Image (tube, rainbow, N blue to C red):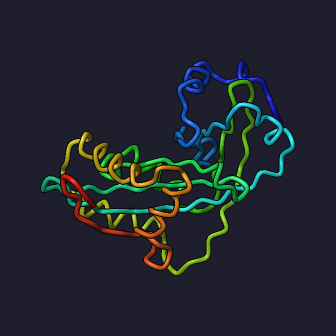
Amino acid sequence: MLQANNMLPKNLQDIIPTLSLSQAVPLGNEKGVPFLMIKLSAGNEEIIAEGGISCEFKASIFNVIFQGENVALCFVQFRLNGSDKHIYTVSYDLHNEKHYNDCFDLLEMRKYGLLIVTDNAHDFIEFKPEFKADFRPQAMIHGAKVLATDYEPGLFMEVAHALTSQGQTPAELWKFLEQMAPFEKSWYGSMQLGATKI
């Protein structure tokens, strides 16, 4: 049900003006269900109000060799109603325990929730992913984490930026990450990142 944003906790109200239209922000767990916040552009309240929102998500798990370190990261992307206009990406540093645990909970593939906001209103919608595969995403991020070296958080930021900048639009990023870590490879890819190219 659509509600005014002044019903949200103050810390969430403060995030909304700065949130990009292609970013998903993890907000922890609510009653055992991981949830994230995404923002629709102005004038999209009717999409929330009408309900019937569908969401698909996929992960892209990487080990990236950069500056002599092995950086482990996972991107999770959400696409609303199958539309390339509504794709949201979150990046997790698998070497960071909080990031890893948030990602691990999400990749249990049972339930997740999205707090979908606009500048004026919001709704919280819970989803059950349809996931049929012969691999466990949680096992894949664990494997990537095991390979990681003890790098500084700034290195993760550099690698995450280098990879996400490969897509000029959210739709291009969706395709790029799908090519680099396809479903048939258990959503996993490994690479070397140089100073000038991937």
Q: Position of residue 90 (x, y in %)?
A: 48, 47
Residue 176 percent across, percent down from the top left: 45, 63
Name the image quarter holding the N terminus.
top right
Query: Where in the figure is residue 10, as x and y percent of width and height?
Result: 60, 18
The quadrant holding residue 58 is: bottom right
Identify the residue shown where x is 81% and y is 33%.
Answer: 2
Q: Is residue 141 left or right of residue 33?
A: left
Which quarter of the figure has residue 198? bottom left
Badge count? 0
**Relative side of 7 to 90, left or right:** right
Front residue of 171/34: it is: 171
Residue positioned most to the left: 68
Residue occupying the point 21% across, 60% down: 65
Q: Position of residue 117 (x, y in %)?
A: 68, 34
74 on left or right of 49? left
Closest to the observer: 61 or 140?
61
Residue 184 higher or lower than 117, as above or below: below
Position above or below: 196 against 131: above
Residue drawn at point x = 32 percent, y = 64 percent: 144
Decide if residue 34 is on the left or right side of residue 154. Answer: right
User: Residue at (51%, 54%) from the top-left corner?
Assistant: 105
